[in-house]
Image (cartoon, coloured by chain):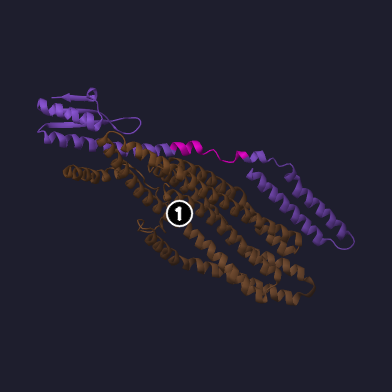
Amino acid sequence: MKQMRLFMILILLVALAVPAQAAEITPPQVPESGARMMPEDTGSFSEGFRQLLEKGIKSLRPELTAATRVSMAVIAAVMILCLLHTFTGKVKAVADLAGCVSIAGILLQTADSMIALGAQTVRQLSEYGKLLCPVMTAALAAQGGTTASAALYAGTAAFDTILSGLIANLLVPLVYLFLALAVAAGAVGEDVLKKMRDLVKSAVSWCLKTLLMIFTTYMGITGVVSGATDAVTLKATKVTISSVVPVVGGILSDASEAVLVSVGLAKNAAGIYGILAVLAMFLEPFLKIGTQYLTLRVTAAICGIFGTKSAVDLIEDFSSGMGLLLAMTGSACLLLLISTVCFMKGVG
Amino acid sequence: MMGGLGQYMISVAAAAVICGVVSKLTEGSWKEMLRLLCGLVLTVTVLRPLAGANPEEWLELPFSYSNSARAIAQSGENMAREAMADIIKSEAEAYILDKAAALNADITVEVIVADEGEPVPAAVRIRGQASPYARRRLESIVQTELGIGKEDQQWTG
């Protein structure tokens, strides 16, 4: 009997190595845009994340230099505007108009490239998500989470499509509209334009917040409900397996356990790689846009000391525009991270 | 739908810009009258599409991923089943070979796993030399302990 047990343990140990080859759970390769930031160590999340942050911080210098250059140009324009304001007397409105146009001229070029970068990042994240999700779905289903995996995939795919479509077709044009309204409000100084500008800003942030809230709620409820169903099914299957012909029942049970363990390991490895790949794709654009956002905030604060209200408001509006872009790229990234973590959580 | 929303926002913003510029440029007694007119134009621009909105169109949103989700989950299940079948095949073969060795039978074994349902051993092909006693014992062990009936046991050699 002892020999028999030893023999079965040996066979189980050999068997554990088999499904690792059989189960092909390979995450999609990180795209070119994220390859530069991708950490060397993708086996451990904490180590990979540390390397990712290191690379991010190292890549910050050129962004800071470019942002400072823009900031200096804006401060110079606001100073000239301030001088014009002091010496022009009756034609202050013209000076305001000229000032706003010149500040917008300096900031629009950077804003345009940042908006294009944000939109491209969202598109790339969405495309990567479309490759990663099926891998994680298949892995979770292989682990016994058939109901949960299908529900999580359906939710992620639907919300990802809605979010990327919403950002590309509505929110990005709305950011342009927001900036246009901000320039018009700064130049003309009419309340109605300021209110419209605020309406556009609220609409963009409300869309993103609501979509993410519904998504996280859906994923949370689906994870718990379907996960519990799968756990019960898995338990019932195990009971059925053990009650089959004695030796076959034992072999089936061991094989099932071996597959669950190896698929679980492969799924976690794929999940960690996927998360790091998503972060690697997200980090560079996030740092670029984030640097612009913070620099514009600082510029607005400095200009607040000597600049006109309309000029300072305009700089703050451009900074808010960058904030909206950060929220968009952040939402796309968060959606993928949440879904990957839900897939990694497993059954039960 | 999103294109329509974008158009709506652009028309509202355009109306706001025109109204803003017009009320800024006018002076004197006409100012109040123009402001009123601008307010009216803006109200119509904002409210008209909202009143004619058809929420049923929103059902066209992509919520039809269930089929592809089920197909992907099924592929995952198949992957796990294949991995299990490989393990079960090799374990069952090793089990029979172990029993054969104890009975001094020199054989090679190929276990065939069921295609549907649980991946249990369904048939076996045994080749090699075994005494009549060893063969009978092995037949019995394969039937009782692995659940493969004698009709599914194929002996050659």
In the picture, the quarter occupied by the N terminus of chain A is: top left
Quadrant for residue B24, please give it: bottom right
- Which of these two is toward me, A168 or B151? B151
Viewed as shown, does residue B98 lie left or right of A35? left
Kind of residue indicated by mark 1: Val
Q: Is residue A54 above or below residue B93?
A: below
Residue A251 in percent (x, y) is at: 27, 39
Residue range (magenta): B59-71
- Which of these two is toward me, A1 or A143? A1
Residue A193 in percent (x, y) is at: 73, 59
- Which of these two is toward me, A230 or B87? A230
Q: Chain of mark 1?
A: A
Tell me, what hue is chain A?
brown
- Give the letter of the purple chain: B
Q: Residue furthest right?
A: B29
Quadrant for residue B33, please give it: bottom right
